[in-house]
Image (cartoon, rainbow, N blue to C red):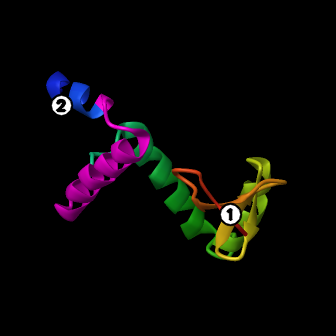
Amino acid sequence: MNTQLLEQASVLNIDEQIELAEAIWDGIASRGAAPALTAAQKAELDRRRAGYLANPNDVVSWDEVKATALPKIGLRQVGAKAAFLGGPCIQNKAALTPISC
């Protein structure tokens, strides 16, 4: 890793660091680059695919997954947005940017 670049990035404010990280990630994605799966990841995907093929009707919709998972991490669904339970809505879950609801 280029430690000089890392040092330069570390003096940026948080918003600039996030913007830089997003730009780097977008550049990686635009090239179609993806890290190779580990053996454990491939095994897990194979296990899940086999389970689906054996029981294709035994599925849970994404809406059901979100409805179950969000409360477990202290969030609730508010339209297309997620909100902290008892707190403000958030616009960007990754950056946890507060907005008014």
Residue 24: in magenta span? yes
Q: Which residues are magenta?
A: 10-32
Going from N to C along the chain, the mark reached first, 1 or 2, is 2
Whether 4 is drawn above or below 64: the answer is above
Q: Which mark is residue 50?
A: none
| Quadrant of the frame with the C terminus | bottom right
Residue at the image position 27 percent from the left and 54 percent from the top: 23
| Residue contact at pointers 1 and 2, CB within 8 angstroms | no
* Residue drawn at x 15%, y 24% as measured from the top left: 4
Q: Element type at marker 2?
A: helix
Kind of residue indicated by mark 2 = Leu
For the residue pair 28 and 82, the one nearer the viewer reads as 82
What amino acid type should be assigned to the residue bearing mark 1?
Ala
Q: Which of the two residues, 6 or 14, is positioned nearer the viewer here?
A: 14
For mark 1, give the secondary structure: strand
User: In terms of image quadrants, where is residue 48?
Assistant: bottom right
* Dominant SS in magenta: helix
The residue drawn where x is 18% and y is 31% is 5
Percent x, y of residue 9:
27, 34
Instruction: Provide the residue designation for mark 2.
Output: 5
The x and y percentages for residue 88 are 74, 58
**In the rendered image, the vertical position of residue 55 relative to residue 28, given as above or below:** below
Picture coordinates of residue 8, whole percent (x, y): 22, 30
- Left/right placement of residue 87 relative to residue 59 reads right
Report the residue marked by disc 1. 82
Q: Residues within 10 Å of mark 1 (few under 14, many from 20)?
A: some
| Rendered position, 2 above or below 41 | above
